[in-house]
Each structure stands twice: as C-alpha cells, then as structure tokens.
Image (tube, helix red, strand yellow):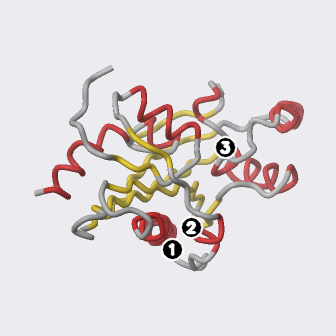
Amino acid sequence: MTNQPVIHLILASQSPRRQQLLRTAGWQFTVDPPDDSVEQAVDGSLPPEQFVAAAALAKATSIAARHEIGIVLAADTVADCDGEILGKPTDRADAARMLTTMSNRTHRVLTGVCLWDCQSEKHTSYVEQTTLKMDAFPSDQLDAYLDSQQWQGKAGAFGYQDGLDWIHIVEGLESNVVGLPVERLSNWLSDLMS
C-alpha cells in the first residue's frame, strides 16, 4: 500500500469494489453516493463512451452540490459488446442474456470517471477502456454461475475479481474492469489541480 497525497476525496459510489480498490491503493476518502435516479436520467441511447462519461458527470454534479470543499470522484462502468451497453442486470434472465451475448467473443469494459473540485467547480472527465475475451461456456457452467448470485450488481453480469477462469484481459487495466482505474487517479488529480 502506498501513501497518497492528502486530498479530501469524496467517492460518489456505494460500490464495495470501488471502495476496496481505493483503500488498497492507499487513498483516504469519504463515501457519498448519489440517488439511483441520477444515473437513470442519463440518455441510454448515447454511444457507450459518451454514456459512461455522461453518467459519471451527472453523479459528480449531484454530489458536488452537497459539498463546499473536497474533490468528488464519480465513476460509471459498463460492458460494451458490439455497441450494446451492458449495465447491471435487472434479474437472472437479463444476466443470462448478457453472458450469452458475450460468450466466445471479445468485448470492452468502459469506465467513465469525473473528478470535480467542489470549491472551484473545476472538473475533468475521462473514459478508460479494457478489452476482454470471454470463453464459450457450456450451459451447466452458465447455470452454476447464475445460481451463485455473483452477477448481481455488476456491469455485464460478471465480476472479474470473482476469479472467473473464462474471462481474460486482452488489453488494459484489471482495476478498470473491477470498476475504477485507480492507477490513473494520481495523474488525473494532478491535471485537475494544475
């Protein structure tokens, strides 16, 4: 664990995975998640890169309005398979559809990140991409994963951090697939404060 600069960082997410990534990287932060309605108001017809950037900006904007100081860190992660945005599945059938769509194919995981300085209102946005390949899997393996409930609350209905041996990173950051490209955070904060 490394010591990061002392910044009043406000994580606009209740994701335990994002919180763990930040803690492991040595960041200190408070948590102030936005209402679900903020993300639901984002235009779902946008291309995937624009969608995650818009969702992260909307989350950051809503949280920054509640704070006079600090830097809001907001993120939104989706899987993208041939232009179809695969967010968090609504139920088991939706999870099965998403996983079947990506089976034996390459897809991308995109995370939009917005950093917002509450005092100056200066903000920056980024989109990080990781390319993955999902093996073909037999129906019994799919059913076993769906039965495990591990897909719940995860973009694309899977969690790379679950140790799934049928998902492989082709190019990009593992942390991005988990939900936050923490390796980029120091540089992004430097850009914001310069």
The residue pinned by badge 1 equals: 47
> Taking 163 as reference, is 46 above or below it?
below
Identity of the residue drawn at 33% across and 63% down = 68
**Above or below for 189 versus 85:** above
Q: Quadrant of residue 80?
A: bottom right
Residue 176 drawn at (x, y percent) = 45, 43
Which is more N-terminal, label 1 or label 2?
A: 1
- Within 10 Å of disc 3 (Cα), the crowding (few <14, some 14-19, many 20+) is some
Comparing 178 with 73, the one in front is 73
Q: Nearer the viewer, residue 17 or 12?
A: 12
Give the mark nearest the N terminus, 3 or 1.
Answer: 1
Q: Which mark is residue 104?
A: 3
Helix, strand or loop under label 3:
loop
Q: Position of residue 111 (x, y in %)?
A: 46, 54
Q: Amino acid at mark 3?
A: Asn
Q: Give the residue pinned by disc 2.
A: 83
Q: Closer to us: mark 2 or mark 1?
A: 1
Nearest to the observer: residue 6 or residue 179: 6
Quadrant of the frame with the C terminus: bottom left
